Image (spheres, rainbow, N blue to C red):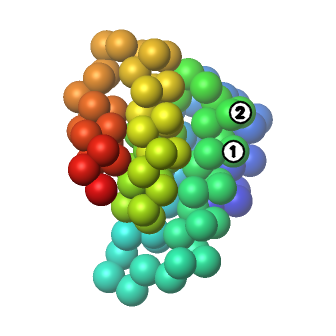
């Protein structure tokens, strides 16, 4: 995750490293043997990358989903709302994260 974070910092408009980091972070945090420390590291990596590349919606979606799955519903909803505000053309997954945050 560290190398992909650095790649995003170097090229914030590149879609591949942002998408890969989002997928790897979700896999690491939500896998069958999820470790809470690894999940927190995944959240930090994706949140930092979304600051470096604010135009990458995959990072915001992953951050919102990770927060919700870890029980941080307020952070998940806030991230989902920020994602909807930044990119209104992709509201589907952000709204579902927001809905899960409210339910959880």
User: Above or below — where is 23 with respect to 27?
Assistant: above
Residue 10 is at least partly visible in this image: yes
Q: Position of residue 99 (x, y in %)?
A: 25, 40
Helix, strand or loop status at disc 1: helix
Q: Position of residue 7 (x, y in %)?
A: 69, 43
Q: Residue at x 58, y 49 (%)?
A: 46
User: Above or below — where is 80 with respect to 102?
Assistant: above
Residue linked to disc 2: 52
C-alpha gap between disc 2 and disc 1? 6 Å
Q: Position of residue 32 (x, y in %)?
A: 32, 82
Q: Residue at x 57, y 62 (%)?
A: 42
Give whichever of 100, 36 is nearer the camera. 100
Q: Residue at x 49, y 35 (%)?
A: 78
Residue linked to disc 1: 48
Give whichever of 80, 41 is nearer the camera. 80
User: Above or below — where is 59 with respect to 104?
Assistant: above
Give residue 70's quadrant in the image: bottom left
Q: Residues within 10 Å of mark 2 (few under 14, many from 20)?
A: some
């Amino acid at each position: 995750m560290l190398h992909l974070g650095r790649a995003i910092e170097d090229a914030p408009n590149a879609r591949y490293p942002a998408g890969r980091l989002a997928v790897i972070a979700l896999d690491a945090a939500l896998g069958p043997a999820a470790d809470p420390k690894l999940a927190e590291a995944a959240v930090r990596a994706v949140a930092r990358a979304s600051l470096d590349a604010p135009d990458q919606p995959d990072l915001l979606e992953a951050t919102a989903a990770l927060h919700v799955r870890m029980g941080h519903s307020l952070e998940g909803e806030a991230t989902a709302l920020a994602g909807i505000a930044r990119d209104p053309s992709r509201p589907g997954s952000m709204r579902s994260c927001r809905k899960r945050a409210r339910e959880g």
